[in-house]
C-alpha cells in the first residue's frame, strides 16, 4: 500500500457518514485542518457529500506551515483558507458555514509552552463560538479530561466527573468549559468529541508499540491498557456527531469498543515480526480509558477492529513504511506532553 492509497483508505466514507452528509444541510468549515486527522476528516466530508448527492462546499482552515498540504487538499476538492486563528483579524476572514468542526488545539510541546497551550486550548474556543454563534459545532476534545480510571471499570463515561492530570489536560477542560459557557450564553449547538485514541499506519499508540518491538526496545507497561480506534472510523463518527450538537453542549466519547492490553499488543507485534517482546515495568490498576458505548449506540461499532488494525500496522512497519515520527507518549501517567 502506498501513502496515496493509505490516504484513500483513511478517507473512504462509511455508510453512516454518507447518510449523515445526505441529511445535513449547508457547508462545512474545518478549523485546524492541518493536524494529523484534519485532512482525512475534510476529505471524507467531501467524498461523503458527493456520494450523497449533496452540493456542499468544504473549507479547511489552518496556518499551513507547509505549501504541500493546501495543494493536496485542493486536489481533493477542499477549499483552503490560510489563517492564524489567534490573530485578532482572522475571524473576519473565516468563511461562513452552518457546520463547524473544531480541530484546533495544542498537545505535543505543551510542556515549556504553557501560555500558548492555554491560549490555543481555552481562549480560542471563545473566539470561535462568537464568530460562529449561528452555526452548529462539533469540537474535538480528548479522553485526557477524565484522568486515570480503574481498568476493571471499562473506562470513563460521558457522565463521569472530570479529573485532569497535568497542564495539557487541564487546558482541555478549559476548552470544554468555554464551549459549554458560550453554548448556554449564545444558544450555540455544540457536541464535544472526547477522542481516545485515533490510529493509522503512520501514527498512533499502536504504531509506537510496534516500532518499539520492531527495534528490540522494551515496551513500557505502567500505562498497561489503552483505547484505539481506526482514524477513518473516528472521522466518520465525528461527521455523524454534527447532527447531535445541542445547547447546552453535550459530550460524546469517540474510542474503540474495548480496553486493549499493551502487553498483548506487543506480543501480537512480536509474533508478526518474528521477535521477542521485552517490557519495562508492570501494569498499574488504572489507566486512561474511555467507555464509548454511547457513540457506538448512535453510529454503530467501528468497522475496523483492533486485530485488523494491528495487522495493517505490522505490515506497514515491517516493510519500512513512512511514519510521522511523532510519538504519542501514551505511557506518561503524569500528563506531560
Image (cartoon, rainbow, N blue to C red):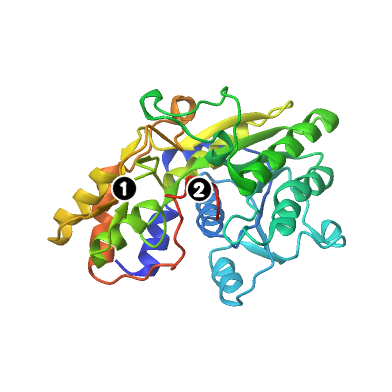
Q: Residues within 10 Å of mark 1 (few under 14, many from 20)?
A: few
- Name the residue that disc number 1 marks: 281
Q: Say which element carries label 1.
A: loop
Residue 18 in view: no
Q: Which residue is mark 2?
A: 48
Judging depth in this view, the residue of 69 and 217 nearest the camera is: 217
Where is residue 40 drawn, in percent x and y? 50, 56
For residue 239, above or below residue 162: below
Q: Position of residue 220 (x, y in %)?
A: 34, 51
Say which residue appears at 74% left-offset and 46% top-offset: 122
Q: Which picture quadrant has residue 35?
A: bottom right
Residue 2, located in which quarter of the rendered image?
bottom left
For disc 2, the neighbor class at 10 Å (few under 14, some 14 to 19, many from 20) is many
Q: Sequence-wise, which precedes: disc 1 or disc 2?
A: 2
Quarter of the C terminus within the rendering: bottom right
Of residues 264 and 293, which is closer to you in this image?
264
Question: Most extreme residue toward the front, as rendered?
Answer: 281
Of the two numbered discs 1 and 2 in the rendering, the one whose residue sits closer to the viewer: 1
Marks 1 and 2, how far apart at CA: 45 Å
Q: Nearer the viewer, residue 194 or 160?
A: 160
Answer left or right for 26 relative to 15: right
Q: Is residue 240 left or right of residue 215?
A: right
Q: Which residue is depicted at the point 52% across and 41% down? A: 195
Amino acid at each position: 500500500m502506498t501513502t496515496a492509497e493509505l490516504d484513500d483508505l483513511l478517507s473512504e466514507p462509511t455508510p453512516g457518514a454518507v447518510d449523515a452528509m445526505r441529511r445535513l444541510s449547508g457547508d462545512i468549515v474545518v478549523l485546524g485542518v492541518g493536524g494529523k486527522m484534519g485532512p482525512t476528516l475534510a476529505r471524507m466530508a467531501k467524498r461523503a457529500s458527493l456520494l450523497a448527492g449533496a452540493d456542499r462546499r468544504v473549507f479547511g482552515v489552518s496556518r499551513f506551515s507547509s505549501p504541500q498540504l493546501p495543494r493536496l487538499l485542493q486536489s481533493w476538492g477542499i477549499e483552503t483558507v490560510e489563517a492564524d486563528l489567534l490573530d485578532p483579524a482572522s475571524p473576519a476572514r473565516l468563511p461562513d458555514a452552518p457546520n463547524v468542526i473544531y480541530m484546533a488545539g495544542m498537545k505535543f510541546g505543551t510542556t515549556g509552552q504553557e501560555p500558548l497551550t492555554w491560549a490555543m486550548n481555552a481562549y480560542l474556543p471563545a473566539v470561535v463560538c462568537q464568530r460562529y454563534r449561528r452555526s452548529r459545532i462539533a469540537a474535538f476534545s480528548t479522553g485526557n479530561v477524565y484522568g486515570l480510571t480503574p481498568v476493571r471499570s471499562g473506562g470513563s463515561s460521558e457522565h463521569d466527573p472530570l479529573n485532569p492530570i497535568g497542564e495539557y489536560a487541564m487546558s482541555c477542560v478549559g476548552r470544554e468549559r468555554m464551549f459549554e459557557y458560550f453554548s448556554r450564553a449564545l444558544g450555540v449547538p455544540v457536541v464535544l468529541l472526547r477522542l481516545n485514541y485515533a490510529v493509522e499506519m503512520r501514527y498512533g499508540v499502536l504504531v509506537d508499540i510496534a516500532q518499539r518491538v520492531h527495534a528490540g526496545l522494551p515496551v513500557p507497561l505502567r500505562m498497561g491498557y489503552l483505547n484505539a480506534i481506526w482514524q477513518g472510523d473516528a472521522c466518520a463518527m465525528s461527521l455523524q456527531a454534527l447532527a447531535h450538537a445541542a445547547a447546552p453542549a453535550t459530550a460524546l466519547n469517540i474510542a474503540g469498543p474495548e480496553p486493549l492490553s499493551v502487553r498483548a499488543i506487543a506480543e501480537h507485534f512480536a509474533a508478526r515480526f518474528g521477535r521477542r517482546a521485552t517490557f519495562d515495568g508492570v501494569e498499574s490498576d488504572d489507566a486512561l480509558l474511555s467507555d464509548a458505548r454511547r457513540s457506538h449506540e448512535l453510529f454503530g461499532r467501528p468497522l475496523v477492529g483492533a486485530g485488523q488494525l494491528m495487522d495493517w500496522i505490522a505490515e506497514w512497519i515491517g516493510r519500512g513504511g513512512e511514519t510521522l515520527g511523532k510519538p504519542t507518549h501514551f505511557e506518561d501517567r503524569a500528563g506531560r506532553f
